[in-house]
Amino acid sequence: MGIFAMPSLGADMEAGRLIEWLVSPGDAVTRGDIVAVVETQKGAIEIECFEEGTVRELLADIGTDLAVGAPLATIQAEGEPIPEAAVAEQATPVEAEQPVVTAPAPQPVAPIPPQRPQAPAPGVVQSSPAARIKARELGFDLAMLTGSGPGGAIVLEDVEAEKTPQSKRSPQDEMRRAIAAAMTRSKQTIPHFYLSQTIDVTPAMEWLTSFNEGKPPSERVLLGALFLRATVLASAKVKTVNGHFTEEGFKPSDKINPGLAVALRSGGLVAPAIVDAEQMGIVELMAAMRDLVTRARAGRLRSSEMTEGTITLSSLGDSGAESMAGVIFPPQVALVGIGAPGLRPWVVDGNVEPRHLVTLTISADHRANDGRQASRFLSVFDSLLSTPEAL
């Protein structure tokens, strides 16, 4: 019997709150099925199952805060025997034969008063498991609190509100706190180095103008999709930038799942990944980017998108600073930062011409890369953007 546990949805995640079950005991599940929704500092994340079988038991209640690795459900694999205890529960009891007794004549029976719900035992406070654990940690007496849960039960929020009644953090504050913790850990543990190169994106922008001509806005391709495609193809050629650094050392990834840094309207940042991006063309990548940004801002990302990134792309868009050197998202080993395009003088065939330029910067983990690999990545990226029709 397999245990489906709370997954880690990023280096900055320590716990999550279960807010919805999408399966019930007895449901069949396969790899990739969305089975639950968990709320973290970065929004609601759809949790995928990576086992096949039948959901046997749900071990966590909705609204409970659970640490990474905490059991959520049990899943019975196909062909796996059902535990004897469960078989006993499912067995239909057989009534023992009773002697035949002649019933007495019916007698008048007094009406039975309606049953009232049984009150909790004296001294027992209705509360959630998470609230009881937190109250023990803080030394609070639950009997002194007022519950806001079903039937007046005390839930975790009630305990936390009592702990810091004047300093409750907003979701945006929680996200900034999580980002700060992850980025601090990244800079403290990853030996970053940075290389930059200015590239001419005029050919790419001219090609886009021609490609998008006559198309409705929903079908147009943006420059960001070309940047993403170039990142994917350059990562395929320079494999040391694509993968994870673990306790065993650097492990290059067979897949290229570029994370896309998305600024949320409410504040904060997430970097969900486009899985198997190496199998997508420009149009498919553009559609995937639109979908990812829409769901990120709606707070409906999937667990695989938050955990399977192998390299990250962060672009400042059409306006902003000329360059950006980002912080690597662990356990990844590289982040590609692209400044805003600008019209500046550039030498072309010995002549100075106005050209659209961007500054491309790679932040690399020195444990997996050195200057030679990072420089080659920038060179390949530049070459790809100079012939956008080949992307």
Image: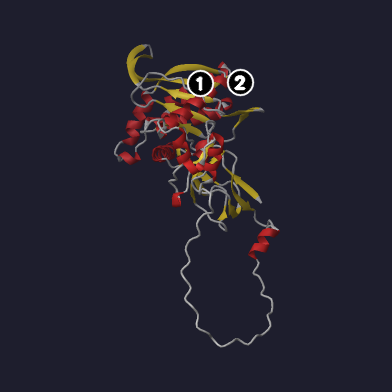
List x then y, in percent, for residue 263. Answer: 39, 31
Contact between labelled residues 1 and 2, with CB atoms less than 8 Å apart: no
Query: Which residue was labeled with disc 1?
Result: 363
Q: In this view, does 371 lie above or below 387?
A: above
Q: Is residue 382 above or below residue 221?
A: above
Q: Give the residue drawn at x 60%, y 40%.
A: 69
Q: Quadrant of residue 298?
A: top left
* Circle on res. 367: 2
For the residue pair 276 and 130, the one nearer the viewer reads as: 130
Callout 1: 10 Å neighbours few (<14), some, many (20+)? many
* Visible residue check, residue 261: no
Q: Give the quadrant of the C terminus.
A: top left
Residue 84 located left or right of residue 343: right
List x then y, in percent, for residue 37. Answer: 48, 45
Which residue type does callout 1 highlight? Ser
List x then y, in percent, for residue 59. Answer: 58, 50
Q: How far apart are marks 2 and 1 (CA)?
A: 12 Å
Which residue type does callout 2 highlight? Arg
Assign a secondary structure to mark 2. Answer: loop
For the residue pair 93 and 110, the one nearer the viewer reads as: 110
In this figure, which colouring scheme has been used for the structure?
A: secondary structure
Callout 2: 10 Å neighbours few (<14), some, many (20+)? few
For the residue pair 42 and 338, the one nearer the viewer reads as: 42
Q: Is residue 312 above or below residue 134?
A: above
Assign a secondary structure to mark 1. Answer: strand
List x then y, in percent, for residue 11. Answer: 54, 31
